[in-house]
Amino acid sequence: MEKKERKIMVAVDESQESMYALSWCITNLISDTTTTNNNNPTYNKLVLLYVRPPSAFYSLDAAGYVFSTDVIDAMEKYSIQLANSVMERAEATCRNLNATNIKMERVVGIGDAKNVICSAVKKLQADTLVMGSHGYGFFKRALLGSVSDHCAKNAKCPVVIVKQP
């Protein structure tokens, strides 16, 4: 009997929408126990993915001054703290839903969110990607772009986009 692991990746960020998508995923897609498919048990693994913006090596302000390395170091430290904070919130959400028997993995990527998410899906061989939707209208999506739209079109696995009611 071969054991198979089903990887469900959830893209999390600072938003309520991503935490709602995580809750929805645990409630609707993941069970604490194994499922059986043709007498082969399938184990669920939850991969929490957070994407940090790329580090700034140098940056100019409005007056054209270059930020000092102290400012850049402080921004990098804040970015790392934010990633840890988001991951802790996500893990607390899992604990609150009594999802303690689920194997979890933290993954932090750096770069443009839509590209990092699609690359992580491929690299980690995720079976399903779950994302929240910010619910932007047509014009805001056209200006800002939509990470979930991009991932739905380009990720190499099924994508579930969860809208908060």
Image (cartoon, rainbow, N blue to C red):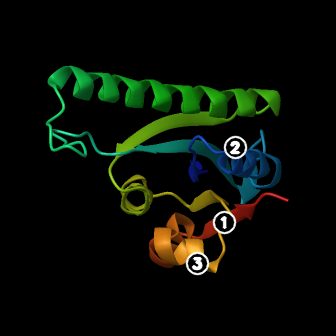
Decide if residue 98 is on the left or right side of residue 100.
Answer: right
State yes or no: discs 1 and 2 in contact (Cβ < 8 Å).
Answer: no
Q: Residue furthest right?
A: 165
Contact (Cβ within 8 Å) of mark 3 with mark 1: no
Mark in front: 1 vs 2: 2
Residue 69 pos. (x, y %): 16, 24
Q: How dense is the environment of label 3, judged by Cα within 10 Å: few (below 14), some, or many (20 and up)?
A: few
Name which of mark 1 and mark 2 comes first in the sequence. Answer: 2
Residue in front for this viewpoint, 116 or 76 = 76
Q: Is residue 113 above or below residue 78?
A: below
Q: Are marks 2 and 3 in contact (CB under 8 Å)?
A: no
What residue is drawn where x is 39% and y is 31%? 79
Residue that badge 3 annotates: 139
User: Residue 109 in the image: x percent, y percent?
Assistant: 37, 44
Name the quadrant containing residue 101. Answer: top right
Per the image, the residue denoted by label 2 is: 19
Q: Which mark is residue 8?
A: none
Task: Tell me the SS state at disc 3.
Answer: helix
Query: For mark 1, what is the residue?
Result: 160
Q: Locate the C terminus by quadrant.
A: bottom right
- Of badges 3 and 1, nearer the viewer stands 3
Q: Is residue 121 above or below residue 141?
A: above
Drawn side of residue 35 relative to residue 152, left or right:
right
